[in-house]
Image (tube, helix red, strand yellow):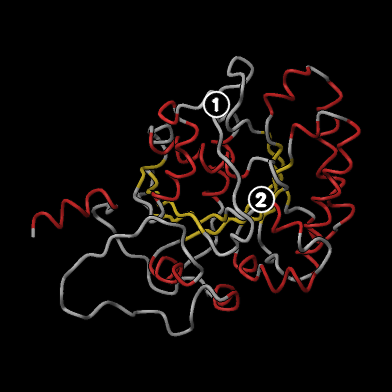
Amino acid sequence: TSRDNSDFIDAGILEGDSEGKTDTDGSGAVQLPEGQPLSVEQLNPIFAAEKSNLCILAGDVGSGKTALLTNIYHAVLTGKYQEKYLFAGSQTLAAFEERAFPTRVDSMRAQPDVGRTPKGSIDQFLHLRFQRRDSGEMINLLTTDFAGEDFKEIHADIHAAQERFPVACAAAHFLYILNGELLIRKRDRDGELLRMEHLLRTFSDGGLLKHNSRILIVISKYDLIAKMDEGSFSDFANSILARVVKKIPALEERCRLYQIAAMPGDTETCLVGYGVEQLLDDILAESSVWSKATQRQVSEMKSQFNLWGELAKR
């Protein structure tokens, strides 16, 4: 049996009568995804079919949200995680490529640049599908790529947050990225932490965080921090969780802290993707979202790539 999806119905991701609907036009055609970011409505068939996990990414402008997503995508393409996970497809390949291209040599850029997510992108979701090597289980990872400006606009405004981000109610993970470049400077630390605390309180007080969702606090750009070689930073980092829980008691025992360098400028200090694999492992390991339909046994993975092969055989 599967778990109740009432959180997804309430958040507008699933419709109460969506279970069991199939294409019955008799054409036998396979429709390939356009590859662009998905809307909330387009998440319906994913959640209705298989185990799925929604992760909200939050953080200020330039904190590294898109860099994290791009690093995970590159790791999937290069098979970095293949000992644990097989890539089983994506419905947003074109969207990932748009974000990843400026980081490659082919872009002719002197330095990699993931750009910025445009303001107002609050109905855009990225999708990756994995198969666990150990169990053969399929899991869909859906993430947001909302702009930092969109979070600024609901600063300490519960009603605005409820109106603009109802989808957060369905998220198994709420991931906030602290800009490590700002945390290096002691004069900027409090401001960066206060922005995070205000946003978490806004979402918590607005009932937008599920009672069993995880709060993942990620310090980005760890390569810049490592260069400092300042022992006091470790003490500061270890104090972050205690500070958050003290100010927002409802988050007690739900917060975890990570330090990553998704795309370090100096790979001698930190390797590309430092800390990201552990973060991804924890996100995929703690999925608590099950569809109403019984999980289907998938004997053969299907993605955009081999769907073309199936079409060619017909």
- x%, y% of residue 310? 15, 55
Q: Secondary structure at mark 2?
A: strand
Q: Amino acid at mark 2?
A: Leu
Single out the residue that lies furthest toward the bottom: 17
Q: Amino acid at mark 1?
A: Val
Single out the residue that lies furthest toward the top: 268
- x%, y% of residue 204? 77, 64
- x%, y% of residue 172? 60, 59
Q: Secondary structure at mark 1?
A: loop
- x%, y% of residue 139? 43, 55
In the rendered structure, which disc, 2 or 1, sits on the residue that comes first in sequence? 2
**What is the tally of numbered marks visible in this picture?**
2
Identify the residue at image location x=72%, y=54%: 254
The residue labelled by disc 2 is 175
Q: Quick check: 182 above or below 38?
A: above
Write down the quadrant of residue 207 in the picture.
Answer: bottom right
Cα–Cα gap, marks 2 and 1? 20 Å
Identify the residue at image location x=73%, y=50%: 255
Residue 170 - label = none
Q: Nearer the viewer, residue 231 or 24?
A: 24
Query: Where's the N terminus, which quadrant?
Result: bottom left
Single out the residue that lies furthest toward the left: 314
Does residue 267 appear left or right of residue 221 in this picture?
Answer: left
Mark 2 crowd level (few <14, some 14–19, many ≥20, 10 Å Cα): many
The residue labelled by disc 1 is 272
Q: Disc 2, disc 1: CB below 8 Å? A: no
